[in-house]
Amino acid sequence: VSDPKMVTITLDFLENVLKAGQKVSNDKGGENKMLIMLDEAGGVDKLEELQEHSNHDIYQKAVRILETYVGEEDEEDGATIPATCADGQQFAFGMGRTAAGALEATPAFTFA
């Protein structure tokens, strides 16, 4: 939808739905089922895309919804960050960590 007014109204509606889901979650315990359904439908990805929107109000609403209801769950995981050498000063590309934390060579690409 390219109409900023429609996007703004939709974001307001979505925020109210997530707020109601959070209230139920707080009252009964458990996770926000509205957020789970939104995520499963790809809505969180769409909200993240709206952070790039040229309309500042849409950008602000998308950021507020993400910060309030999604939080920091989508932060980078340790698997995407290169290991560092023992001195912590250099990255050890091509190296991974064992369960005990020691560096070990990781296999290169294999083509079957």
Image (spheres, helix red, strand yellow):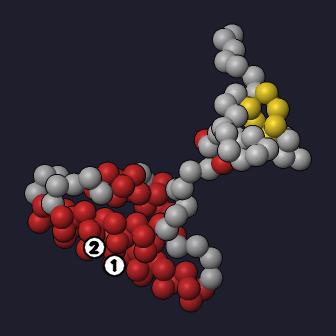
Q: Residue at x 79, y 44 (%)?
A: 86
Residues 57 and 82: in front is: 82
Say if mark 1 contacts mark 2, CB within 8 Å.
yes
Amino acid at circle 2: Phe
Classify residue 94 by image quadrant.
Answer: top right
Give how far across and how far down residue 66 sits, in percent: 40, 66
- Compare residues 89 and 112 and report the one nearer the observer: 89
* The disc label shown at residue 13, or none: 2
Q: Which label is found at residue 16?
A: 1
Q: Position of residue 49 (x, y in %)?
A: 32, 51
For the point 40% across and 80% down, the residue is 19
Name the side, left or right, on which 107 lies relative to 42: right
Quarter placement of the C terminus:
top right
Task: From the top left corner, tell me how far across and down residue 108 is, in percent.
Answer: 70, 19
Answer yes or no: is residue 11 visible. no
Query: Residue at point 13% right, 52% down?
Result: 2
Could you say whether the residue bearing mark 2 is in a helix, strand or loop? Answer: helix
Question: In the drawing, what numbered circle is on residue 53?
Answer: none
C-alpha span from label 1 to label 2: 5 Å
Residue that extends furthest to the top in the rendered view of this protein = 112
Q: Nearer the viewer, residue 91 or 65?
A: 91
Q: Could you say where residue 65 lies in the image, as x and y percent from the top left? A: 37, 70
Q: Quarter of the image holding residue 111?
A: top right
Q: Is residue 59 visible?
A: yes
